[in-house]
């Protein structure tokens, strides 16, 4: 189950899982990008989510299909699954690293989180957040994102790529990929860019923060050094030509875009947020989230990737491993319920 109406890392991973797992079907919102992405696939798609009667439609679907397990890929899907499960085990996929069970509704959220049979955490950092929120460690499986490495290992014509995106000759090309939302840290990145005079930044991604970012870019006098590219389906065709990849997130479950950039051979400067250090390891520069001065200094540095980085990432983020580990988590949830 996925209630998202956008196409982001979670939907990419779910699509990959569904395409490689014939026994799974998916309940989603009818007009979601995920529905379009699966339209020509041999995947059972049930567009029953969205609107005030989602819980009733999902419960009816569950009664007809009688699935062995319900897997929720969003917070809203988590709530709906508990309402519709009818005694069946619920597995919750958790991709974010913000705290569980805080604020006014914290006690209710903790009850919600204890009601699921198992959790699939995208990183050790997210697993730690779940444990801090009251989830039993034995009920958590850590399954990192998977990436098909082949598209990112292609040879790139660096000059053609720079011309394609309007990167000036002689500039240090900094590339970022991520939705234009607050926790991705783009506002921190733009502030940091002011102290790196020879850098040109491209940001692939779209989101509600675009207007504020455009105003910030103009106020900082960076209009000639920053391009907001919007949503792009061709990132793998040019990312490998960038001089550095920048990922300044304030919060981050893992960092799928960081994996892709490193596979493409691009040195990484990133924040030490959530599971990002688990991806970068010793193959990049990490700074504290939100630290403009440290990020500026890191952007002016010249990190390198080790010779073993690509092989390490290919092994750890292999799609076959994602599928096997996820299905094993589902089997454990089923077995625990008898």
Image (spheres, grey):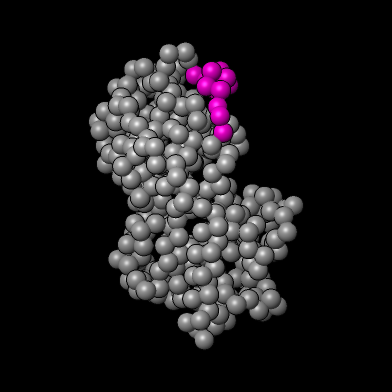
Q: Nearer the viewer, residue 241 or 3?
A: 241
Task: Residue at 29%, 30% (x, y): give it.
Answer: 298
Quadrant of the rendered structure where residue 172 is? Answer: top left
Task: Residue at 43%, 23% (x, y): give it.
Answer: 173
Percent x, y of residue 44: 71, 63
Percent x, y of residue 27: 64, 64
Quarter placement of the N terminus: bottom right
The correct choice, above or below, for 333 with respect to 297 in the image is: below
Q: Residue furthest front?
A: 307
The correct choice, above or below, for 8 with respect to 303 in the image is: below
Percent x, y of residue 12: 57, 50
Q: Is residue 46 left or right of residue 291?
A: right
- Residue 218 appears in the figure: no
Task: Residue at 54%, 68% (x, y): give it.
Answer: 327
- Residue 139 appears in the figure: yes
Q: Residue furthest top?
A: 169
The correct choice, above or below, for 266 with respect to 140 in the image is: above
Q: Is residue 320 magenta?
A: no
Percent x, y of residue 86: 57, 81
Q: Residue furthest left?
A: 293
The correct choice, above or below, for 308 with respect to 125 in the image is: above
Quadrant of the rendered structure where residue 102 is? Answer: bottom left
Q: Which residues are magenta?
A: 154-167
Q: Is residue 155 magenta?
A: yes
Task: Residue at 35%, 32% (x, y): give it.
Answer: 304
């Amino acid at each position: 189950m996925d209630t998202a109406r956008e196409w982001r890392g979670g939907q990419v991973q779910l699509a990959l899982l569904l395409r490689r797992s014939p026994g799974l079907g998916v309940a989603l919102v009818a007009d979601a990008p995920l529905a379009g992405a699966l339209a020509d696939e041999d995947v059972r798609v049930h567009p029953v989510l969205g609107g005030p009667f989602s819980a009733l439609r999902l419960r009816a679907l569950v009664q007809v299909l009688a699935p062995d397990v319900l897997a929720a890929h969003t917070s809203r899907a988590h709530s709906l699954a508990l309402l519709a499960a009818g005694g069946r085990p619920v597995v919750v996929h958790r991709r974010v690293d913000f705290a569980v069970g805080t604020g006014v509704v914290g006690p209710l959220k903790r009850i919600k989180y204890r009601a699921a049979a198992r959790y699939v955490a995208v990183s050790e950092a997210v697993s730690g957040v779940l444990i801090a929120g009251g989830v039993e460690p034995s009920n958590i499986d850590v399954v990192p994102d998977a990436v098909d490495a082949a598209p990112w290992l292609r040879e790139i014509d660096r000059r053609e790529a720079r011309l394609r995106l309007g990167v000036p000759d002689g500039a240090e090309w900094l590339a970022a990929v991520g939705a234009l939302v607050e926790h991705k840290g783009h506002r921190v990145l733009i502030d940091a860019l002011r102290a790196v005079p020879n850098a040109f930044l491209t940001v692939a991604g779209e989101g509600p923060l675009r207007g504020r970012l455009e105003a910030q870019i103009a106020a900082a006098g960076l209009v000639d050094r920053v391009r907001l590219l919007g949503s792009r389906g061709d990132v793998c065709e040019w990312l490998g030509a960038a001089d550095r990849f920048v990922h300044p997130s304030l919060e981050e479950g893992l960092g799928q875009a960081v994996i892709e950039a490193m596979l493409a051979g691009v040195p990484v400067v990133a924040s030490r947020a959530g599971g990002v250090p688990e991806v970068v390891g010793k193959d990049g520069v990490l700074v504290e989230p939100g630290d403009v001065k440290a990020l500026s200094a890191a952007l002016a540095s010249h990190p390198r990737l080790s010779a073993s980085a690509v092989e390490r990432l290919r092994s750890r983020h292999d799609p076959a491993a994602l599928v096997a580990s996820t299905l094993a988590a589902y089997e454990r949830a089923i077995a625990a319920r008898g």
